[in-house]
Image: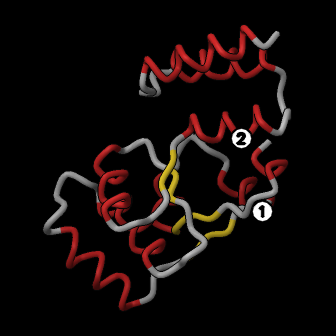
């Protein structure tokens, strides 16, 4: 589904190594780009991690990668990483943004989107309740 959005999807090798319940090989075969931080970027990661102790260094790797690339959008559900990116002028979004793209491009029916969102919530994904309710209401009204 992500590939149908015609975006380039990229993550750092540090993030990929953390994904234990995901078939990362299949994602890479499907087109996920995996980047490694340069030595200088790793040093920068260690430097800034001391000032951002509540953001995991692995997550900070996304911030470091995005700071040197103008075409990057950081996707995260971590509010601290989101705030850091916003403060640095890096575009940042979450899973609801992806669902909005899927909706706008009509890649799933509204019913499928509602089911997908409800499944994410049922699995314990934290998503802002007012935003979720707003989308469900909007999608149900469009039927």
Dot 2: element: helix
Q: Is residue 14 left or right of residue 34?
A: left
Q: Which mark is residue 101?
A: 2
Q: Residue at x 14, y 69 (%)?
A: 50
**Quadrant (top left/top right/bottom left/bottom right) for the N terminus:** top right
Question: In the rendering, at what x and y percent does residue 44 appear?
Answer: 29, 82
Q: Residue at x 46, y 74 (%)?
A: 65
Local crowd size for mark 2, using a 10 Å CA cut-off: few (<14), some (14–19), many (≥20): some
Q: Which mark is residue 91?
A: none
Question: In the rendering, at what x and y percent does residue 20 appear?
Answer: 52, 46
Spatial CA span between label 2 and label 1: 18 Å
From what the image shows, is residue 48 above or below residue 58? below
Residue farthest to the bottom? 40
From what the image shows, is residue 96 above or below residue 70? above
Question: In the rendering, at what x and y percent does residue 108 appear?
Answer: 83, 28
From what the image shows, is residue 99 above or below residue 53? above
Q: Is residue 50 left or right of residue 26?
A: left
Name the quadrant containing residue 70.
bottom right
Question: In the rendering, at what x and y percent does residue 74 appear?
Answer: 50, 58
Dot 1: element: loop
From what the image shows, is residue 127 above or below residue 88? above
Q: Which mark is residue 31?
A: 1
Q: Residue at x 46, y 48 (%)?
A: 76
Local crowd size for mark 1, using a 10 Å CA cut-off: few (<14), some (14–19), many (≥20): few
Q: Is residue 114 left or right of residue 40?
A: right
Q: Residue at x 60, y 20 (%)?
A: 135
**Quadrant (top left/top right/bottom left/bottom right) for the C terminus:** top right
Of the residues under marks 2 and 1, which one precedes in the sequence? Answer: 1
* Residue depth check, mark 2 versus mark 1: number of the one nearer the observer: 2
């Amino acid at each position: 589904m992500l590939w149908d959005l015609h975006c380039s999807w990229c993550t750092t090798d540090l993030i990929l190594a953390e994904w234990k319940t995901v078939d990362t090989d299949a994602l890479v075969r499907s087109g996920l780009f995996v980047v490694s931080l340069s030595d200088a970027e790793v040093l920068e990661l260690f430097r800034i991690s001391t000032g951002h102790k509540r953001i995991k260094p692995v997550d900070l790797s996304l911030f470091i990668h995005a700071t040197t690339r103008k075409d990057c959008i950081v996707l995260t559900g971590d509010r601290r990483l989101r705030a850091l990116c916003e403060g640095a002028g890096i575009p940042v979004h979450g899973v609801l943004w992806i669902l909005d793209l899927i909706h706008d491009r009509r890649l799933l029916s509204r019913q499928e989107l509602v089911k997908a969102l409800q499944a994410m919530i049922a699995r314990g994904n934290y998503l802002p309740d007012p935003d979720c309710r707003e989308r469900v209401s909007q999608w149900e009204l469009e039927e």
